[in-house]
Image (cartoon, rainbow, N blue to C red):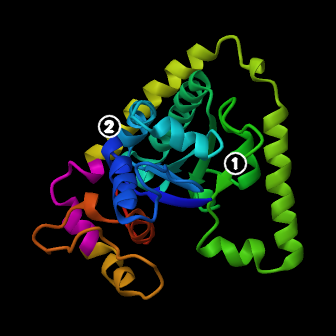
Amino acid sequence: MRNYIISHTETVSDLLEVIETGVLRGYLGSKDDPPRGVMVIPLFETIADLRNAPVIMDEYFKLPGIDVLIGNQGNEQEVMLGYSDSNKDGGFLTSNWELYNAELALVALFRQRGTTLRLFHGRSGTVGRGCPTYQAILSQPPGTVDGQIRLTEQGEVIASKFGNPEIGRRNLETIVAATLEVSLLPDENALADLPKFVTAMQTLSDSAMAAYRALVYETPGFTDYLFSSTPIAEIAELNIGSRPASRKLQDPKKRKIEDLRAIPWGFSWGQCRLLLAG
């Protein structure tokens, strides 16, 4: 199965354009012979995109010919969730809460349709994007890990997790064990007063996101401060990444936090040494 992951999926047309282009160019089958062995995978990254994920997927499923395409995929569809960009967009707490809600909504949609959902978590294995892998898998919402899960492992964790055969085997065993355990746990074990906790979490998330956005996106001069007080310019020049630090060429007079990729943003802001005197 060849996978085409569509970064920053914001509308259903982002998926349709890839399919249409592939069909027209002949490497994704033809209009008379739908693609086989091919899966177009949306990647929902920002807070708004996570909230829109079930709506976009519902629209995608209703498009003419998609039923045949999904059938050729074994009645299975993968959806990727972005941890870094949602963190940069809404802050750590809101990012994790919106990921949780998006997963539950997608599970409900796929169950209604009768299609198998495989969630692809772009968390890279770092504690900074959640928690250790075993706990991260066990903490997934009910029904989201149904015998399978896909995770990214990249960057600084590859050497530490898989540089040694014994350690690599142990890490794989941990992932398999967590996947089996959470898949076998009965969904009906949810707390009777769960709605109370959901309401509390939503209140905390709304407050946390408002505070985070007020600092990072709404404070006058914050962007200038970021570029002058952190090593983001130096990080952008390091030849250690596969992509540029910004999605757009950064004019010093028009720099925007929104255009920065999440990893350079996180690494540079993490290097900020700010002392507040009170």
76 is higher (above) or lower (below) than 3? above
* Front in this rendered view, residue 66 or 211: 66
Q: Residue furthest left?
A: 253
Helix, strand or loop at mark 2: helix
**x and y, in percent, of residue 71 in the image:** 59, 40
Disc number at residue 108?
none
Asked whether 84 or 183 is in front, the reply is: 183
Q: Look at the image and tell me whether residue 97 can be seen.
A: no
Left or right? Give the position of 170 relative to 219. Answer: right
Residue identifier under label 1: 149
In the image, 3: left or right of 183? Answer: left
Regarding mark 1 in the picture, which secondary structure is present there? Answer: loop
Q: Residues within 10 Å of mark 2 (few under 14, many from 20)?
A: some
Quadrant where the image shows the N terminus:
bottom right
**Pointer 2: what residue?**
210
Amino acid type at mark 1? Ile
Residue 39, image x, y percentages = 54, 53
For the residue pair 76 and 234, the one nearer the viewer reads as 76
In the picture, residue 268 is in which quadrant?
bottom left
Magenta span of residues: 215-227
Does label 2 or label 1 sit earlier along the sequence? 1
135 w.r.t. 57: above or below = below
Q: Contact, CB < 8 Å: mark 2 with mark 1? A: no
Residue drawn at x 51%, y 35% is 67
Q: Residue at x 31, y 65 (%)?
A: 260
Q: Is residue 223 magenta?
A: yes
Q: Position of residue 116 (x, y in %)?
A: 65, 36
Query: Which residue extends farthest front?
Result: 32
* Main secondary structure along the magenta-highlighted residues: helix
